[in-house]
């Protein structure tokens, strides 16, 4: 009996090696297939090139502002009475001095007519008194000349001189009385005018709070009541808006502003700061603001605007032209951006040194090159450094 173990043949070893290779290949192929099927899909992102352009440093209002009229009068008659005339309606355009409302004033018209008559009578009496005074003065002068020739008695001359002096005094008194009556005419006319409400300037009647036959009364001291007529001048408009107290110290009258209105969202208006309030408002807790007023630089552009429109103002503090810039929405905290690498479709994080910045663009001082692609849609899920991404085909051509 042969006790030596059997030696495997070389062909059998080769078969085992080939089988192991095939097994490993199958395992690798299966693993690759599994990875391919289960691999994460690339995240679509919105990209934009680092380009050149102008960047502005600006501050904007914290809450919506309001378009105001430079001239606006909420007026009421200075005296009470029954409304007998309202010649205007809401929306009417009126001229300065035009009658807006009238109260019953028949009695005051009668008093004015009486005052005119009394003034006329007083003037006539003054003329009469002054004519007599002139006659007495001439008589006294004539007698004084005759006295030198001793043709008249001294007593007669004395009486004539005294009568002349009395006549002059009577003339002055009559004229003073006439002046008093003229003043009474002015008083009566003023009382009558208090019953007629007139437009203090050209404008549009915004509101009428009275009806024919109603009785209106002026507001008691300290108790505001609705105005009888609300008149708005449209020749001059401006915007008032609250600016955060932190931003307010950098704002000065005369600085350029950009004004936007919800009603004209596609058409920003140019303006300039006309006033910065010298005090801080604290109408809301932890929200202290300063009122800033901005006027429109082109008066013709405001012809379709109405007082009361909501508006926002952006005050331009500084401007840089032809500088590298990126959209501010792409900037992460700490002035970082995600740069897209076309060679492998991956994102890398890059820090940069900023210059001027506003809500739209941020200036690049260093850290990025012109033409590099950065991610704008940083808020999308999965957008982070190292992520595999693809450009979003529906990004509007960015």
Image (cartoon, grey):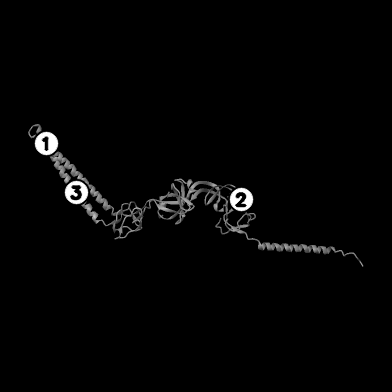
How dense is the environment of label 2, judged by Cα within 10 Å: few (below 14), some, or many (20 and up)? Answer: some
Q: Nearer the viewer, residue 265 or 398?
A: 265
Give x and y (percent) for residue 40: 64, 60
Mark 3, residue position? 120
Q: Residue at x 78, y 64 (%)?
A: 19
Q: Residue at x 43, y 51 (%)?
A: 240
How dense is the environment of label 3, judged by Cα within 10 Å: few (below 14), some, or many (20 and up)? Answer: some
Mark 1 or mark 2, which is nearer to you?
1
Q: Secondary structure at mark 2?
A: strand
Mark 1 or mark 3, which is nearer to you?
1
Mark 2 or mark 3, which is nearer to you?
3
- In the image, residue 138 sits, relative to residue 300, either above or below, namely above
Mark 1, residue position? 158
Farthest right residue in view: 1
- In the image, residue 16 sits, relative to residue 70, either above or below, namely below
Farthest left residue in view: 151
Give x and y (percent) for residue 37: 66, 63
Q: How many marks?
A: 3
* Image-based side of 25 in relation to 139, left or right: right
Distance in Å between CA atoms under marks 1 and 3: 35 Å
Residue 98: in sight, yes or no?
no
- Give the mark nearer the N terminus: 1 vs 2: 1
Q: Secondary structure at mark 3?
A: helix
Q: Residue at x 18, y 48 (%)?
A: 121
Q: Secondary structure at mark 1?
A: helix
Mark 2, residue position? 350
Q: Nearer the viewer, residue 71 or 319?
A: 71
Distance in Å between CA atoms under marks 1 and 2: 119 Å
Residue 172: image tag: none
- Give the mark nearer the N terminus: 1 vs 3: 3
- Give the mark nearer the N terminus: 2 vs 3: 3
């Amino acid at each position: 009996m042969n006790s030596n173990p059997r030696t495997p043949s070389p062909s059998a070893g080769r078969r085992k090696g080939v089988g192991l290779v095939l097994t490993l290949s199958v395992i690798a192929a299966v693993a690759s297939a599994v990875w391919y099927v289960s691999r994460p899909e690339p995240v679509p992102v919105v990209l934009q090139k680092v380009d050149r352009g102008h960047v502005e440093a600006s501050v904007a209002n914290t809450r919506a502002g309001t378009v105001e009229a430079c001239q606006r009068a909420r007026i009421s008659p200075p005296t009470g009475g029954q409304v007998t005339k309202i010649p205007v309606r809401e929306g009417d355009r009126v001229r300065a001095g035009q009658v807006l409302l009238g109260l019953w004033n028949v009695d005051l018209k009668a008093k004015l007519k009486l005052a005119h008559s009394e003034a006329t009578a007083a003037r006539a009496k003054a003329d009469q008194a002054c004519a007599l005074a002139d006659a007495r003065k001439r008589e006294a002068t004539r007698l004084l000349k005759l006295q030198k020739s001793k043709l008249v008695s001294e007593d007669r001359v004395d009486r004539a001189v005294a009568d002349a002096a009395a006549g002059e005094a009577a003339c002055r008194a009559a004229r003073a009385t006439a002046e008093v009556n003229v003043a009474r005419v002015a008083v009566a006319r003023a009382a009558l005018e208090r019953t007629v409400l007139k437009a203090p300037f050209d404008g549009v009647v915004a509101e009428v709070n009275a009806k024919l036959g109603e009785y209106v009364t002026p507001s008691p001291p300290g108790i505001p009541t609705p105005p009888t007529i609300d008149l708005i001048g449209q020749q001059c408009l401006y915007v008032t808006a609250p600016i955060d107290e932190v931003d307010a110290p950098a704002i000065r009258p005369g600085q350029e502003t950009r004004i936007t209105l919800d009603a004209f969202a596609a058409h920003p208006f140019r303006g300039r700061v006309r006033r910065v309030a010298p005090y801080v408002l604290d109408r809301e807790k932890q929200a202290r603001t300063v009122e800033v007023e901005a006027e429109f630089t082109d008066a013709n552009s405001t012809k379709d605007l109405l007082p009361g429109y909501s508006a926002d103002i952006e005050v331009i503090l500084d401007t840089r032209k032809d500088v590298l810039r990126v959209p501010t929405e792409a900037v992460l905290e700490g002035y970082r951006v995600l740069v897209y690498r076309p060679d492998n479709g991956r994102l890398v994080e890059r820090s940069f040194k900023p210059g001027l910045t506003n809500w739209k663009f941020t200036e690049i001082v260093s850290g990025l090159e012109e033409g590099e692609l950065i991610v704008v849609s940083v808020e999308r899920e999965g957008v982070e450094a190292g992520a595999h991404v693809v450009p979003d085909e529906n990004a509007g051509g960015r």
